[in-house]
Image (cartoon, grey):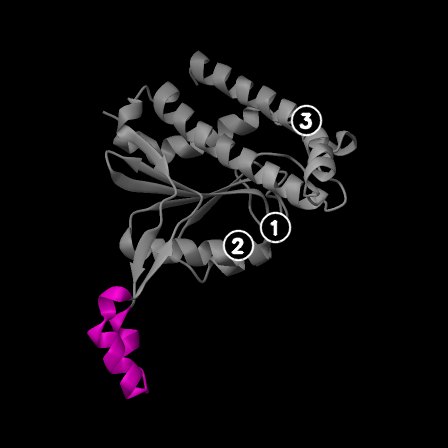
Amino acid sequence: MKDTTLKSLDELCDRYRTTMEVMETGATNAIRDEGRAYGGFIRMAKGKFQEWLTQRLVEITWESELGESKTRLEINSKKIPIPIQMDYVGNLQNTVVKAHLEKNQEQYKYGLSVDKHVFIDNRFVLGIESKAYTENAMIKRILVDFYLLKTKHPDLACFLFQLESQLGGDYSSELKNPMGSPATHTLMSYFKDVQLNIVTLLEGERKVDRPINDPNFFKELKREHLEVAVDNLLATLKPFEK
């Protein structure tokens, strides 16, 4: 891996450490000054940080490791319209509703997005869900979202980047090639076209009563974990280098 890439990853580790250190202070101030709930503030702060971290990993992989121009790269989360399926309309028993939907089918769309949409040369190539942690109830929604996106973008690569794992199995211990967990693999088996790649950045299963922003339960973000994330992104982005 290039020295510039490794330096950038070290900076991300430092940023993570600083963010966790100040999060408790920020939560205390938000409670005092704004009357906000501690748990809600912490969840929002962790979620925002993880989204930022995910985007930086994509940018570092593309610009530093691959040496590609940032002008070719776009990352957003704009809603993508998913159209109604007309075979569903054709099977409706209510003839009045059926006739209405057939006549107005262009109006029936669902706006869908995941946390990060990665475009190369205006082509949607990679979707990433970015979570502070994930449990299997959340995996179900993630799989459905990616399934719907792939009806319009069948070649889309699908990733989940999580700080901590609450999925069971070895997602939080074998960061490079996890075997996963029985429940997660069972859910994914019903969405064969999705091929969800799960990348966990911190070691140790998430514990509800041991938040990582608490200095007593702090978990180090190690550079080698970020290197694994970059390697995973490289496999998807390298085919688009010039």
Callout 1 touching callout 2 (CB < 8 Å): yes
Mark 1 vs mark 3, foreground winner is 3
- Mark 1–mark 3 Cα distance, whole angstroms, equals 28 Å
Looking at the rendered structure, the kind of residue marked 2 is: Ile
Prevailing secondary structure class for the magenta stretch in the rendered image: helix
Mark 2 vs mark 3, foreground winner is 3
Q: Residue 22, which numbered label? A: 3
Looking at the rendered structure, the kind of residue marked 3 is: Val
Q: Which residue bears the numbered disc 1?
A: 167
State which quarter of the image contains the N terminus: top left
- Quarter-of-image position of residue 117: top left
Q: How many marks?
A: 3
- Mark 1–mark 2 Cα distance, whole angstroms, equals 9 Å
Taking the view exactly as shown, the residue that stands out farthest to the front is 33
Residue positioned 28% across, 22% down in the render: 69
Taking the view exactly as shown, the residue that stands out farthest to the right is 216
Q: Residue 139, which numbered label? A: 2
Residue 197 image point, x, y percent: 46, 44
Considering depth in this image, is 107 or 85 the residue closer to the camera? 107
- Quarter-of-image position of residue 33: top right
Q: Upstream in the sequence, badge 2 or badge 3?
A: 3
Residue positioned 55% across, 54% down in the render: 138
Classify mark 3: helix, strand or loop.
Answer: helix
Q: Is residue 1 visible?
A: yes
Taking the view exactly as shown, the residue that stands out farthest to the left is 103
* In the depicted structure, whether residue 4 falls above or below residue 197: above
Query: What span is colored magenta in the figure?
Result: 85-107
